[in-house]
Image (cartoon, rainbow, N blue to C red):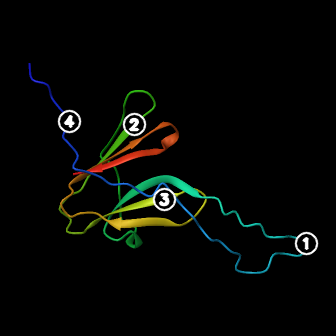
Amino acid sequence: MAVLASPAFAEEVACPPSISVKESLEQPAPDKWSVRIDTSARYLAGVSFFDGDPKEAKSIAPVRDFPLSGKDRVALWNFGPSGEPVWLACRYLDTGISLSRQLSSSYKECRVTYGAGGIVKAIACK
């Protein structure tokens, strides 16, 4: 009996797990109010894939999303022959700042493994 194996994913693509953000007010604080700046790390909240530069806002939806054992789940993205490079954007909690990078043009699909609470555990592309 043949055992069907899932295709091997060539490269783990990791978002930085956290970033430090320096925020400030654009105007003075209102009378009788003081400003407190939270300098704690902003942790990875999620990822998105884009067909071209994320500034163009052409996000790609996953083609499949399915549960694994326990509370984990996997989402799968396929990248077609649009001619545009695929970008990965990493989003962080409590900030509008995201990090993005262009992925290798050789990638035709990526899968993201999520843990409990939607926490990104792994990104693998081939």
Q: Earlier in the sequence, mark 2 or mark 4?
A: 4
Reading the image, the residue beneath label 3 is 91
Q: Earlier in the sequence, mark 1 or mark 2?
A: 1
**Which quarter of the image is occupied by the N terminus?**
top left
Name the spot of residue 117 as percent of width and height, x first: 52, 40
Residue 32: which disc?
A: 1
Reading the image, the residue beneath label 4 is 6
Identify the element where label 4 is drawn.
loop
Identify the element where label 3 is drawn.
strand
Name the spot of residue 40 as percent of width and height, x first: 64, 59
- Whether label 3 touches label 2, CB < 8 Å: no
Gap in angstroms between the C-alphas marked 1 and 3:
34 Å
Outermost residue toward the bottom in this view = 27
Give me the residue at 38% from left, 72% from top: 56
Three-letter code for the amino acid on which mark 3 is drawn: Arg
Identify the element where label 1 is drawn.
loop
Gap in angstroms between the C-alphas marked 2 and 4:
15 Å
Q: Label 4: how many residues lie within 10 Å, few (<14), some (14-19) or many (20+)?
A: few
Q: Which image quarter: residue 105? A: bottom left
